[in-house]
Amino acid sequence: MSLLSIINSRLGIGIVLGVAKNTSTKTGYKLADFAADFLCKHPNAKLIRAARANQWVITGERLSKEELDIQVDQTIRNTAHSIFEFYHYMHDYPAIREKVIFTPKVTRVLKERADCGEGTIFIGPHLGNFDLGGRAIALQGYKLFVLSYPQPNGGYAWQNKLRREIGLDIRPMSTENMRAAKAYLKEGGFVVTGMERPLDKTNYYPKFFGRPAPVPTSYVRMALQTHSAIVVLACLRNSQGKYELSCSDPIYMKPYEDAQDEIERNAEKVLAEGEKMIGQNPSQWAMTYPVWPEALDEMP
């Protein structure tokens, strides 16, 4: 069994949840650092190799081996801190309201989209603490229909159950759930899904950081079919240790005569907004699956 499968298993998540709920933040951060150091001492582990390849691409393919070591170490450390904070604060709603800051633009966009009568698809890159950000938005009274990774294993299924406790309607991506999401959008609702976790099988490879990538694109056709706008949303840690929600302007999809162009060109408009957010905060990008598999053989 790989390190990644252990971490994402029901047992692994149960251990993290138990520790996070029953330790102070001081102890929790120390344990998170210990876990990050342990993972980084296994450079051949799939999640470390994937994080390394991903960081190699988004930092311009210019880091030396030593610089990449430091970058990956910081990335895994930030990810460990974010996981601890999510499970530590997940049931402490006043603390979530204190921990997550709504920028004026996010406040304005959420209100405008809720009042405009159109559906909105929020696309989230795996930056900072996207789970904590989603809970903070739900605590503001917004109802979110979340499309998660399809066919979740035991650990992911349990994570989704924990997320539902705050009222988030989380469903794994499927034909049936996509149909329900479209109906919700037509009523002016908010649908949330991820941006860049790579797919095992796809017919579309939009460019992401200049390279074709097997990233999700189903939101493009969903937006076109429901006349919905897309907003890229991120929850980033600031220098004070809090998280700030930031977002793009609403993006509208454009019909094309060629189906391939329609999906890939529109997805690239959305991905370009994600590139800006990730490029400005590379060590907060918690993507431990290889977005560009060929980079596994290119990185130093």
Image: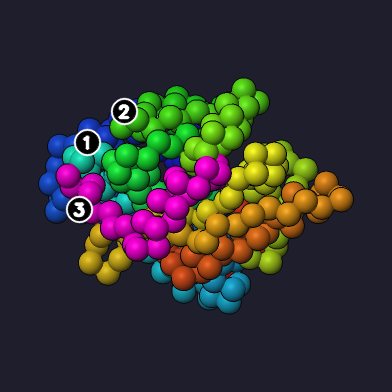
- Is residue 97 rendered to the left or right of residue 55? left
In this view, the residue farthest toward the right is: 257
Q: Quadrant of residue 11?
A: top left
> Quick one: label 1 or label 3, which is nearer the N terminus?
1
For residue 165, the mark is 2
Q: Is residue 105 magenta?
A: yes
Assess whether mark 1 and mark 2 are in contact (beta carbons under 8 angstroms). Answer: yes
Residue linked to disc 1: 91
Q: Position of residue 116 (x, y in %)?
A: 50, 47
- Tag 1: residue type? His
Task: Please name the residue shown 44% across and 67% down the image.
Answer: 281
Q: Is residue 216 visible?
A: yes
For residue 98, the mark is 3
Q: Quadrant of residue 182?
A: top right
In the displayed structure, 274 sits above or below 20; it is below
Magenta stretch bounds? 94-121
Task: State the colouring used for the structure image.
Answer: rainbow
